[in-house]
Amino acid sequence: MSNQNDAHTELGTIKIHRNSIASIAALAALDIEGVKGIGKNFYSSLMELVGRKNYGSIRVEFDKNGEVFLDIPLVVKYDFSIPEVATKVQENVRNSLEKMTNLLIKDVSINVQSIEKN
Amino acid sequence: MRTLGILFYTAVLVFIGLLMITFSVVLSIPGLQLQSIKFFNDLLYVIQSSLNYRLVISLSGVLLIIISFSFMQLILTRFQREKTIAFQSPSGVVTIAVSAIEDLIRHFVLFIPQIKELKPDVIVNRKGNIIVNLRVVLKSEANIPELTGQLQEITKSKIQEVLGVEDQIIIRIHIAKIISREEKEKRGKDSEKDEPKIPFGGYGRV
């Protein structure tokens, strides 16, 4: 499976790595009120220990048509409605990615991992 | 696949256990001691002298590690899938980990002063109903029927409000312990006694 999405122009190819897509998605998600942070997995925790900011816990996949599927683990703030926050995150991530990369976003899945206080 | 994984781990652990038992039994029989030591010595010598044997052993080790990791990943993914509440939104699926609901319960229960400790356990059954088991330690001044009723109501409404679900929510409360005032005071004194004194701790304080 490719790590990046290729777009062909008259002058050459534009490649957007999945890490860039994950970063845009993370920043868009963090913009929403009620989002405490991006959830972690083993790899991202390890990278954080080494001192590198990493959004490796966000899964980015491309299908054959070049459409993007995202799976974002979230930590939601206490006292916020999860469906509302999740829907806002999905919309903002979709808009940001479409605006910045021109990619077609198929699905933005949200996985609420935990709830934390401010 | 999960059953296969569990069977694999059980078989490996049983094999290791049997090997250890056999090893200790053989080495404790006086007549067999010398022979068994010689046998292990010969075995190690054969392994050491042959590259093929060494290769086979290390490859088996690598294979075992790969199989273990694959089974672990499969089992964990399966567990993770089961332990979530999911709903569909126009942009995709939203899944909420059961542990997130447990976090939520722990947070709002802090505001109930009669509760000393609370351990939530959330289960989502096949019908999609949310079952919340609350194990509670209460302070002695609490009125149990009133408090448990209040706790059930708050838990239910808070879950419905935060998760936006209309599914049936069943709240079960188990009072594990009631702490009396004396016990509480005793615990407080004990913790004060146990607290080690820091040398020059008060130095510089006005």
Image: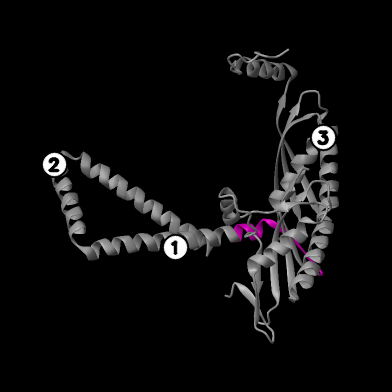
Q: Give the quarter of the figure containing the N terminus of chain A.
A: bottom right
Q: Residue at x 78, y 72 (%)?
A: A98
| Alpha-carbon span between mark 2 and mark 1 | 40 Å
Q: Position of residue B175 (x, y in %)?
A: 72, 34
Q: Earlier in the sequence, mark 1 or mark 3?
A: 1
Chain letter for mark 1, please. B
Q: In the image, are marks 3 and 2 on the same chain?
A: yes
| Alpha-carbon span between mark 3 and mark 2 | 71 Å
Q: Which residue is mark 1?
A: B67
Please tell me in which quadrant of the rendered image residue A31 appears.
bottom right
| Callout 1 secondary element | helix
Asked if A7 appears above or below B109 in the picture, the reply is: below
Q: Nearer the viewer, mark 2 or mark 1?
A: 1
**Magenta stretch bounds:** B78-90
Q: Position of residue B27 (x, y in %)?
A: 21, 42
Q: Earlier in the sequence, mark 2 or mark 1?
A: 2
